[in-house]
Amino acid sequence: MAITRRKFVVEVALGVAALPLLGKSALAQAKGKVGYMKIVDTAPIYVAMEKGFFKQRGLDLELVPMAGGATILPGVASGDLQVGWSNVISLYQAHVGGFDFKIVCGGAINIKGSNDTHALQVLKDSPIRQARDLEGMTVAVNTLNNIVHLMALAWLDKSGATSSKVKFVEIPFPQMEAALVSGRVEAISAQEPFVTSSVGKGVTRVLAHTWSAVAPKFLIASWFASEKWIQKNKEMARSFVQSLNQGVDAIHADIQGTRNIIAKWTGLSADLAKQVALPLYEKGVSEKDLQVTIDLTHKYKLIDRSFRASEIISDLAPRG
């Protein structure tokens, strides 16, 4: 469902009072809350925390693990969170709905072949072999009308099937495998680490890497803040971006060490953390990597108008 101002007002009214805004004079001891998800995509913030990059720049951050954009976006809107993590589709919907969220730095990039973090899966012995075989079937996505659902629709239509002939149901990623085994659904659109885990157990096989089949490279999700907060707290926002990007550099310098840190912060076993596909972590934000999904989001009527990617990128964000 598209994000509306009415929905945000209701959720924000139930939230915690905003933290005081921190200006230049408070930078040395600047405190803030960051809403994040305990997933591999947010590895740069784990690394930056572990290596003390935020503290080196005078930031005392509290990381708040949350379920996803449905709770993180209202927290940023209310001021209870200063920075949050969200998939780009939710940010597009919020932008069209009138909210001033801006992407402040690079995030998780899906790249065909080298960084495929998502897959459409079926049971290992399923007769389903191509997109058309899914017509009349039921497919699980974690959230309707969001990035997983959108890319599945686009892949079906691009691959010779008719997406309107496929039924989609909401099932959280951790519960998808059980739903597939029980016969509740015929296919699941799953994210790492669930893809690698299920295939490794011999339960499923990958039917397609739907995301990269639709777009060879695009931004999946990233860090964002309210433009109003950014303008009042530019030094703090800039320090956040610089520290996080140090984390990105550290990841590229030591990918194995990063996998160990991911296991610590996400609760994955060390063995699974070594195997899962990781997104590409980038410091800069590419308008091209956003525009492809903005246009798709409009095409599939998840937003009622398209717009230029530059509209949701903060001036503080390095350009990719």
Image (cartoon, rainbow, N blue to C red):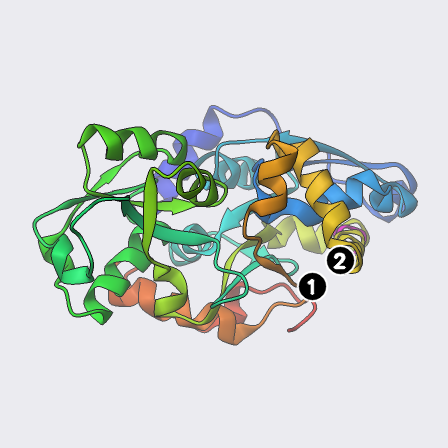
Look at the magenta stretch and give its main secondary structure.
helix
User: Where, quadrant-wise, is the C terminus in this rendering?
Assistant: bottom right
Q: Which residues are magenta?
A: 237-241
Instruction: Find residue 184 and report its image quarter.
Output: top left
Q: Position of residue 65 (x, y in %)?
A: 59, 30
Could you say whether the residue bearing mark 1 is in a helix, strand or loop? loop
Q: Is residue 273 left or right of residue 169?
A: right
Q: Is residue 291 left or right of residue 29?
A: left
- Numbered badge on residue 283: 1
Mark 2 vs mark 1: which is more N-terminal? 2
Q: CA distance from mark 2 to mark 1?
A: 5 Å
Q: Residue at horizontal 68%, vertical 64%?
A: 317
User: Where, quadrant-wise, is the N terminus in this rendering?
Assistant: top left
Q: Position of residue 197 (x, y in %)?
A: 46, 38
Q: Is residue 227 left or right of residue 55?
A: left
The residue tagged 2 is 245
Q: Nearer the viewer, residue 75 or 142?
A: 142
Q: Residue at horizontal 43%, vertical 30%?
A: 11
